[in-house]
Image (tube, rainbow, N blue to C red):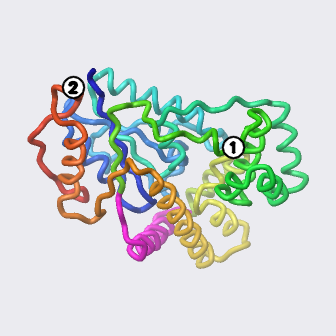
Amino acid sequence: MVESLVVAVVGPTAAGKSDLSVALCKQLPSGSGTGEVVNADAMQVYRGMDVGTAKITVAERSGVPHHLLDILDVTQTATVAEFQQLARAAIDDCLRRQVVPVLAGGSALYVRAILDDFEFPGTDPVLRERLEAELVEHGSGALHQRLAEVDPAAAAQILPSNGRRIVRALEVIEITGGPYVATLPEHTYVYPGAVQLGLDVPRPVLDERIDRRVDRMFDNGFVDEVEALLAKGLLDGRTANRALGYPQVIALLRGELSETEARMRTAQATRRFARRQDSWFRKDPRITWLPWDAPDLVDQALRVIRGNHPGPADVVGMEEGLGAVDARG
């Protein structure tokens, strides 16, 4: 049976996933002459959230098609289940055209939900409404304590401040009668030809890269971006306004923080998030980790792919004799 090649480039924020994904798309032969990137970043789906999410620019895409960027307004909510459907549709479309889809993003749950055999439990509108009312009345801390009592493992994986995920976990527990963590995907690919590549960045280096990125964001118009999005209803949405850095800039615009404080808190929150990302991805033994700054990074990635998929007789979209390029050039 022919296995269709699906590549995923994962790792913490600021690791260089976008650059490697574009470089791989140029090197992986396919029916259209190039691979195509499928975004797996939960916040880059929003139109206008460009600077704050470090969204790859049109110029940086180098002509490589990108899917699932800029598909929602900031007032809309992106759920993991909906994203799973959209991403799989984009991947399947690529495979039908004999194009190699390269999934790129740091949202670990989104990547797992797309690649793995995972069906989401349904939702109960009445139950959800009740839990959301309790969230407003009692706060996320109280609901997190309740979650810890009924499912300690789930509570350990969800921040006490993340009211939306706490509500969803409690909803699933009541619907299924079982623990929430039991509904998370197993390590079973829905695409048997999947290959995951992780970018390994030493923590001190990653912290420095994050600090530089945050400074670039503020220097390149992040505050103006948030101000424009507020006029488009950013605060009316349930998801977009919680993206890294956006709550801090909103506080800055309200006069609650200085710009220096907003920069500092954005960098701190991003560093914490990067640690959680890395921790989540490290739990998946199927990921092959590559040094982020290797001069032959793309060549190493191609060797991993070839090691998983030995030749064109076995895999759609894979051939021998691929050269190396510099992922940052």
Give the answer, above or below, for where 15 lies relative to 263: above
Left or right, 22 with respect to 204, comes to: left
Q: Which residues are magenta?
A: 199-222
Badge 2 element: loop
- Residue at the (67%, 69%) spot, across then down: 252
Identified by mark 2, the residue type is: Gly
Query: Disc 2 vs disc 1: which is toward the camera?
Result: 1
- Residue at the (81%, 58%) spot, across then down: 145
Residue 202 lies within the magenta run:
yes
Badge 1 element: helix
**In this view, which residue lies farthest toward the right?**
137
The reply to whether residue 101 is in sight is no
Marks 2 and 1, the one that precedes in the sequence: 2
Query: x and y percent of residue 228 in the render?
Result: 61, 53
The reply to whether residue 204 is in sight is yes
Q: Return the residue at label 2.
A: 31
Give the answer, above or below, for where 226 lies relative to 131: below
Q: Return the residue at label 1.
A: 180
Which of these two is toward me, 308 or 110? 308
Which of these two is toward me, 193 or 45? 193
- Residue at the (58%, 30%) spot, across then down: 119
Left or right, 4 with respect to 283, comes to: left
Q: Are marks 2 and 1 in contact (CB under 8 Å)?
A: no
Query: x and y percent of residue 219 in the render?
Result: 47, 69
**In this view, which residue lies farthest toward the left?**
321
Which of these two is toward me, 101 or 301? 301
Query: x and y percent of residue 159 in the render?
Result: 68, 59
Label 2: how many residues lie within 10 Å, few (<14), some (14-19) or many (20+)? some
Residue at mark 2 to residue at mark 1: CA–CA distance? 41 Å
Query: x and y percent of residue 226 in the render?
Result: 60, 57
Identified by mark 1, the residue type is: Tyr
